[in-house]
Image: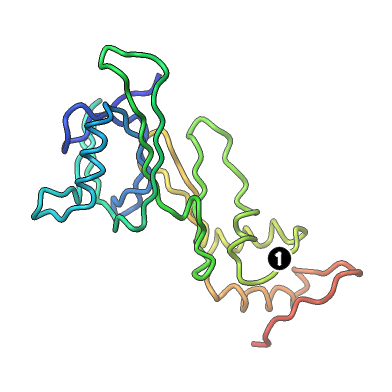
Amino acid sequence: MNVLYKLSVIADIFTDAYLIDDSNTLVFLSVWGRDTALQEFLARLQLSSSNNGIRDFHIIGNNTDQYVRLPNVDELDKTTAKTSRESIYGTLTQLWIFDKLAVKPDLANHRALMFYHVDEIKPDPWSMVKMVCPLPLLDIWRDTILDVCNEHKWIRELDKGYGMNAYYIEIKDELEIVMTKLIQEHKLTLPDDCCPVQLHEV
């Protein structure tokens, strides 16, 4: 069973999974509580700190005191689910808050997120890389392109939290230069029946 941590800002709300980035900015949060407490939490996320809004908080418990900073709420999405049976606290609701990039990749800026539970096998980021990449990619290039992305930190693993990790993908325009060089060095090849990929000369 997952450990439950308290949130410092509202009593009777507990988290069983969270993920933050290197700057302690929230990426994913799973919280449990009564519906009224969760509605208060969501409402205060919309307010400024001067109006008793929540702009940051601490996750506390199990020898943990983790500071969490909130991004712009426009960057976050949410979903909820109620338990099917009564607990000692009454009917509980689970609320997930997460970066919108997980459900709507930013194709204009070539960014995406892939969440996965820490107990699961890590997902293959290749399909998401192909989706956000501004250049056409062939599946036979998978290993080479992923090596390039990892080397340039265009794919980064986020693992600061509890219960949930993610791949953060951000493909830079520099990839076109790198791919051109790899093609010239015959490290990226084309099938005989494939039309050439049009890249600018460097």
Q: Nearer the viewer, residue 183 or 32?
A: 32
Q: Quadrant of the C terminus?
A: bottom right
Query: In the figure, 98 relative to 143: above or below?
Result: above
Q: Position of residue 30 (x, y in %)?
A: 36, 35
Residue at 75% of width from left, 68% of height from top?
187
The answer to which image quadrant residue 16 occupies is top left
Residue furthest out toward the right: 192
From the top left corner, tell me how far across and down residue 173 is, in percent.
Answer: 55, 75
| Residue beneath the point at 62% across and 76% down | 176
- Residue 172: percent from left, percent from top: 52, 71
Rendered location of residue 109, percent (x, y): 49, 69
The amino acid type of the residue labelled 1 equals Leu
Q: How many marks?
A: 1
State the residue lying farthest toward the left. Answer: 50
Q: Answer yes or no: is residue 171 visible.
A: no
85 and 144: which is toward the camera: 85
Up-down: is 130 above or below 81?
below
76 vs 9, left or right, is: right
Q: Give the quarter of the image for residue 132.
A: bottom right
Using residue 118 as the reference point, say whether residue 61 is left or right of it: left
Q: Residue furthest bottom?
A: 201
Q: Is residue 149 visible?
A: yes
Q: Which residue is mark 1?
A: 137
Mark 1 packing: few (<14 Cα in 10 Å), some, or many (20+)? Answer: some
- Say which of 188 and 117 sits in front: 117
